[in-house]
Image (cartoon, coloured by chain):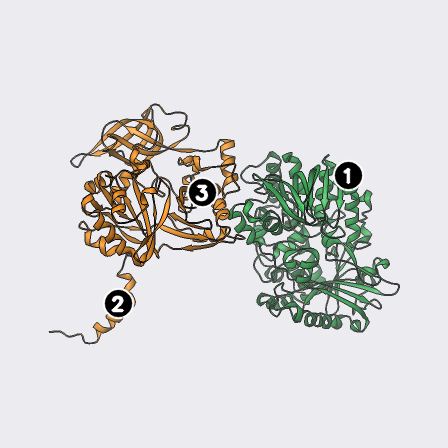
Amino acid sequence: MTSSDLNWGAIVIGGGHNGLVAAATLAKSGRKVLLLEAGNEVGGAGRTEEFAPGFRVSAVAHLLNRLHPDVVKTLELERHGLRVERVDFVPSVALSKDGPLVLHGAYGEVLSGASRSEQSAWKVLRAQLLRYAGVLKPFLSRRPPDLAGMSLAEMTGLGQTALALKKLGKEDMRDFLRVLLMNVYDLLDEQLSDDRLKGLLAFDATLGSHLGPRSPTSLLGLYYRLAGEIGGLAGAQILPRGGMGAVVAAIRSAAEKAGVSIRPASPVAKVIVEKGRAIGVVTQNGETLRARTVVSAINPATTILDLVGPREVDTGFVRKVKNIRMKGDAAKLHLALDRPPQFAGVGVAGHKGRLVIAASPDHVERAFNPSKYGEFSPEPVMEITLPSLVDASLAPSGACVLSAVVQYAPYALRQGWTAGKPQFLKAIMAQLEAYAPGIGATVRHADLLTPADIEARYRMPGGHWHHGELQADQMLMLRPVSGWSGYDTPLEGLFLAGAGSHPGGGISGAPGLNAARRIIAMRA
Amino acid sequence: MNQHPTIKPSIDARALAQSHSRTLRLGTPFQPRIDALGLKQDWYSWAGYRAPHSLWDEELEYFAIRSQAALFDISPMTKYRIEGPDAEAYLDRVTLRDVTKLKPGRVHYTAWCDDEGFVLDDGTLFRLSATRFRLCSQERHLPWLLDSAFRYEVSVEEETEVVAGLALQGPTSFAILRDAGFAGVERLKVFDLAEFAHDGATVTISRTGFTGDLGYELFVPADRALSLWDRLMAAGELRGIRAIGYTALNRARLEAGLIVANADFTAAEHAIRADRLRMPDEIGLGFMIDPKKGHFNGRRAILEARAKKTLRHVLVGLEIEGNIPAEHAIVYYRRSQEVGLVSAAMWSPMAKRNIALASLQRPYGDTIVDDLWVEIYAMRELQYQKLMKRAKVVPRPFVKLDRRTANPPADF
């Protein structure tokens, strides 16, 4: 084992986007920061990768819809190449055999393809959803309130939320509280009648979680989605040029500018703990690196159980960490196509957007049912993008990239993914064929990543992009575990900064930024 | 005469299927002998077992401990067998004291805490070999012990039912063991243990006990329990050996200044009220905390409470004027301000003092130790007489006997 005399201000483990954000923010505060990435490239699940000769695609996350404005501002990402403009907003298209329905602008500012009465019902519901998500927004971005020892700033933050609630007015506030823990299925039934629209919303509410639209609390997922914003507009989404890797590149550039030393291909074997304090890490190559602060932007369970080890923390804490649920249900499909597919009835703008196969809330629910018993959906629901239509450089000339998030694909498939994967791919292709006839014949290469593949490739236990189910019992003060939601851990000098921490996953940078701010505030 | 030909058999069948309801409390492996001696039929439930408060005479049972030898059945005590290459490291993480310093063949008194640093229980840890331990305690902890074993190469098994235990305590206890033929028992120093042959099996004898007197504890497979009892009783006949119940033992332990879980403090998993939880420093177990040893459960919380001075209680020994036991009396500062409660009290025949254990709210008992009073309700011919008595904080143990630690042990 070699030992380095060099002492770092902070070592950040994991070069996913949250790790990069945390490292950059800490470096900007004057700390000497080293970032250790296990893979050959930073970016984690936000990388852009070549999956077939000449075809490149966003590895896991393919839509940018929640990059936190404070991250953009703090790291001056626009100066580092991030471009988000209103013209880049892409629509969401609910595919249906009855013809598509399109949500234009920021989450359906304009709805087309629906009846006049449905349009006005949507206008009311959309406003309400955004209003309620707005109340939760500060909660879903800042450090969760520390009820035991609240600082003045935290009190002020809570006060603002109370004020926002009050501003809703009496009727609205009651309704907000009434629907908060409802399932999305029943709520949609109260206000809408178009199955296509309801199907899309039911899909969005349950995307990335082990819930069906009829599962209690499934509405929270929709709030989480709408609490995100891009370009200053809640619910908006873009397909970043260059794929998600371009967004990561901007963050990386900001980190490097701030002085972060980035070391790829340096997986960490161990966090060194002395007398209850994390004092550095040992890499898998046997190098010992010491630091004043160790920040883990990888999975919380991996951090505590594998890098720290249960011996250095208390039994009750280990119990909690072991109980974090994180078995993913989402698969990722990449297709290299000879030519752009034609989804029936969808226009040019629609093809550049997000195409959703979720014909009705019942369809989503039926797709969910088998996953409870370890089986994949025979008629899966999915969110499709064609990124090469937005950025032609992602595919060879004339060819096309298809990127889809497909549910439900339970991590622990009963029959095992070796046997299940070809069958699941077949089920997905049958769905695609139904909406884009002829697509199957144009497939040059198909790459299906099951949660098991995502786990292995992107070091996400359970293949779960939130690094822990994002449900009511694992949110806010309960994330990653109760009592330790503020990015600190029972070990002095060790902080968590990944998606497993509050508020959760998606390309937001919020956990990374919050963790860094916490470290700076603690003068750690 | 009325006849009920069909009803009776069906009741019998049902009663047979519910035989557990007729054995209200379990018997220990020694029960046949204890039942035969239990003249007073004064039983209580000790962890579900039928244990005697007193067998024949509380006073004489107590004096058997101090003047002769007393035999007390400790089989209901919860016992865990902890074994494996990581057993030492595992126990060092679970319990407060430094297990790496506990040598094979030694016993130490320790305690263990939850994440918040609150005491789950106290007990004795026997190191039977480099890789094998026995942990004895008042309460049951298997889920906690098993969850704590995650990523340790160690097995944890409850052995309460299969291992019978006896405490042989009192000045003649050593002589009895020697006369019973346990050759080499004279070599045991306090907190030593060794194995001896008994009835084709092995008995583990340790020089430990809960009386502050010369004494031993013996652990034997349950099916050899009765022969061990008989062997000791035969050897001890001329040295005054007597079976005793808990009331007598409880007096001896109070004189020795020892605490009892859920009597002198509320174990963390039992406490319903948040302010009843206690850290080691709050029940006189602060000496067990070793910040220099490896990580142990509750370390962070305990050291933080010390650093931030948030410890709220203290357990003290009191000497109270007069001779009326102050059991469960309220403790006052300047005769008026309530500052704590007595958890155990007695007139000590050995110390010739009126002694008590009390939990006080800091700073009382900690930095303020003067002007403390206890309010005793003395029942005198169906009328309470309220007595306000001066109490003085005194060190524990209240009774210190040289024979407990003398080497070689005295031959009384």
Q: Which chain is orange?
A: B
User: Quick check: can you spot residue A350?
Assistant: yes
Chain bearing mark 3: B
Choose between A502 and B294: the one closer to the eye.
B294
| CA neighbours of label 1 inside 10 A, class few (<14), some (14 to 19), many (20+) | some
- Dot 3, crowdedness within 10 Å: few (<14), some or many (≥20)? some
Q: Please tell me how crowded label 2 is: few (under 14), some (14-19), or many (20+) other residues with Cα within 10 Å.
A: few
SS category of the residue bearing label 3 = loop
Label of residue B102 in the image: 3
- Mark nearest the camera among 1 and 3 is 3
Reply above or below: A253 against A400.
Answer: above
Say which chain is green: A
Q: Quadrant of the N terminus of chain A?
A: top right
Q: Judging from the image, what secondary structure is the residue with disc 1 in?
A: loop
Q: Name the image quarter holding residue B392.
A: top left
Q: CA distance from mark 1 to mark 3?
A: 50 Å
Residue B15 marker: 2
Residue at 66% of width from left, 62% of height from top?
A452
**Tag 1 subunit:** A
